[in-house]
Amino acid sequence: MTRWIGRWNRYWFPTTTTRTLALCRIIAVSAQLNWFPSLLSHINLASKNPDFVDPQVLIRGITFIIPRDVLFTPQGITTLYWITLVAGLTALVGLFSRPSLFIFALGNWIFVGHRYSYADVHHPEALFAIFLMTLALAPSGRSLSIDALLRRPRARNAGIHDDDPVGHFQSLFLVMDDKQAGDMYLLVQPAEPAAQLF
């Protein structure tokens, strides 16, 4: 059984670094900052249209909590625009990577949803917006980032000499136990070094 689990883990959780994710973060955020929505077009849409024509699901959820005349005004859109832009710049350099990427991705989702809430148009930006959110959930700030530079002295002071801190985390594996006729058990065991699970 242990040999089977070892094979399973080697196949699905190969030892790797987080540099590929970091490069994806840098390229994706750079591209999105290059394609960043126009502030004036969003202000124009919100100003000239008193109501949404076909509000997207995200926009309906937001307006259920925050009234349209609070967030989707020129001041509200300008505030959201600058928060999203600053979050994108901090995500690019890797400062507070996960929260920055999450705020940047969510801000882009709101802008995409806002833009397409006034007409029936296909939105090709949706796939890229989903990719940005997956980067927020991945450890894309573990290398090639300011977060990684700040983490090094703390790791050295704690006596951790491994360059890849992912190996020091615990991971959850769902393992089937043959002896118990297929009952599933959730086991906590140390992750392989650089397993990149978080």
Image (cartoon, rainbow, N blue to C red):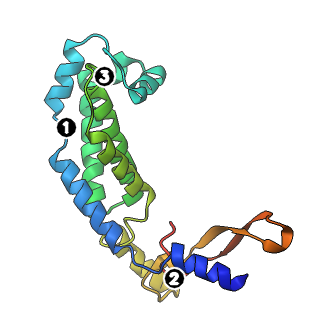
Density class for disc 1 (Cα within 10 Å; few <14, some 14-19, many ≥20) is: some
Which comes before the other along the chain, label 1 or label 3? 1
Looking at the image, the residue that sits furthest to the top is 50
Image coordinates of residue 7 in percent, x first then y, are 59, 81
- Labelled disc at residue 193: 2
Q: In this view, does 35 lie to the left or right of 146?
A: left
- Kindly identify the residue that appears in the image at 31 percent across and 12 percent down: 51
Image coordinates of residue 121 in percent, x first then y, are 25, 26
Q: Which residue lies under the disc numbered 1?
A: 37
- Kindly identify the residue that appears in the image at 30 percent across and 27 percent down: 114
Q: In this view, does 125 lie to the left or right of 135?
A: left
Which comes before the other along the chain, label 3 or label 2? 3
On the image, which quarter does residue 123 sit in? top left
Image coordinates of residue 132 in percent, x first then y, are 34, 51
Q: Which residue lies under the disc numbered 3?
A: 117
Q: Which amino acid does label 2 sit on?
A: Pro
Q: In this view, does 172 lie to the left or right of 15?
A: right
Q: Which amino acid does label 3 sit on?
A: Ser
Which comes before the other along the chain, label 1 or label 2? 1
